[in-house]
Amino acid sequence: MTIDTRKQALAARVDDHIEIAVEAEDGTNLKIHASFEPLDALTGDLEVILDGDDSDAA
């Protein structure tokens, strides 16, 4: 797995799915097409992480 620092991210609803475009600082671009169900689960995970105690971060 490669980890890059995110420079910019955009999301849009397109018909029956969501598209997420991410640009890394090194210029690498990634475009994700996903249905609502996996993104809803991801949103829940992100909310738990963001609402969590910073002392739990590794």
Image (cartoon, rainbow, N blue to C red):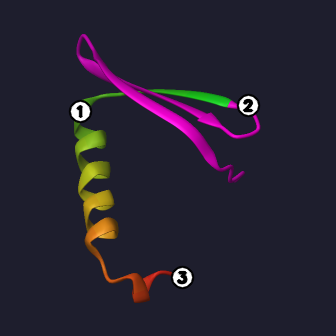
In the picture of the structure, the residue carrying the numbered disc 2 is: 27
Count neighbours of disc 3 (C-alpha within 10 A) and say few if under 14, some if 14 to 19, many if 20 or more: few
Residue 1 to residue 9: above or below: below
User: Which region of the structure is painted magenta?
Assistant: 1-28
Q: Nearer the viewer, mark 2 or mark 1?
A: 2
| Residue 26 percent location from the top left of the image | 76, 38
Residue 38 pos. (x, y %): 30, 41
The amino acid type found where label 1 is placed reads Phe
Instruction: Give the mark toward the camera: 2 or 3.
Output: 2
Quadrant in which the C terminus is drawn: bottom right
Horizontally, is 48 left or right of 32 in the view? left
Relative to 31, is 29 on the left or the right?
right
Q: Which residue is mark 3?
A: 58
Residues marked 2 and 3 touching at CB (< 8 Å):
no
Residue 57 position (above or below residue 1): below
- Secondary structure under the numbered disc 1 in the rendered image: helix
Badge number at residue 17: none
The local secondary structure at tag 2 comes to: loop
Lower position in the chain sequence, tag 3 or tag 1: 1
Residue type pointed to by label 3: Ala
- Label 2 vs 1, first from the N-terminus: 2
Judge from the rendering whether residue 18 lies leftward or rightward of residue 6; answer left or right: left
Question: Farthest top residue?
Answer: 15
| Residue 12 included in the magenta stretch of the image | yes
The residue indicated by pointer 1 is 36
The percent coordinates of residue 42 (x first, y second) are: 32, 50
